[in-house]
Image: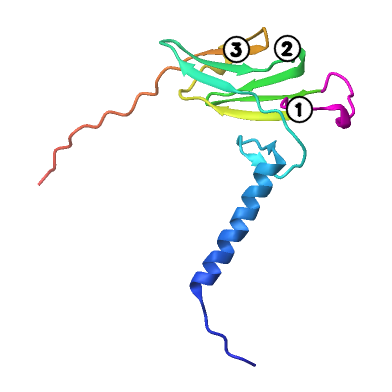
Amino acid sequence: MAIMRWEPLGELEGMRRAMDRMFDQMIGGAGISRLGLPSLEGGKTFLPSVEVYTTENEVVVKAELPGLEAKDVNVEILEDHVMLTGEMKKESEIKEDNYYRTERQYGHFERMIPLPERVKDAEAKAQFKNGVLTIRAPLAEAMKKPQGRKLQIEE
C-alpha cells in the first residue's frame, strides 16, 4: 500500500469542476423549477419575461406571453408570490432542415414570481390583452410590529 501526499487544492479544483458541470447541466436543460431556477429536465423551454412593480395601493405583475391565449395559461397567487404555468406550442411542423434561423422558444413553462409586498390574494385580478398578462393585487395591510415598553425594575 502506497502513501500518497494529500493536496487540498487539488480536491478543491475537483469540486469546482463538478459544480461547473452541475450548473452547465441545469442551465443547458432549460426546464424551470418551482423556485424559478433551471431544472435538470431536457429540451427547450419557453420562459416568459416579467416585470413586477408596486403602486400606492397594489402590486402589478406583467408577463409577456406572445402567441398564447388566456386559456393556455394558469395563474395561481398567494400572499407572497405568483405562479405562472402553461405551454408554448409550435404552430406547425416544419422540418429542421428547412430552418435558417429560429430564436423563438417553445415548451412547457413554470415560473414562480416572488412579490415585493404581501397582497390580498383573494382580491387579485388578471387580464390578458395583446399577449401580455397583467395581474393586479391590492396590498395587504402592513403587519403592525409590537411596540415595546420600558419596564420598571423592582428592587
Q: Does 91 appear in magenta?
A: yes
Mark whose residue sits in front, 1 or 3: 1
Q: Does 63 appear in magenta?
A: no
Quadrant of residue 50 in the image? top right
**Of residues 95 and 44, the one drawn nearer to the viewer in this rendering:** 95
Task: Name the residue type under label 2.
Answer: Ala
- Residue 100 screen position, x and y as percent: 79, 27
The part of the chain drawn in magenta is 90-105
Q: Which residue is mark 1?
A: 101
Tell whether 107 sits left or right of 154. right
Q: Which residue is mark 2?
A: 70
**Of residues 99 and 122, the one drawn nearer to the viewer in this rendering:** 99
Q: Which residue is mark 3?
A: 134
Task: Name the residue type under label 3.
Answer: Thr
**Of residues 25 and 104, the one drawn nearer to the viewer in this rendering:** 104
Task: Name the residue type under label 1.
Answer: Arg
**Eyeballing the image, is 21 above or below 142?**
below
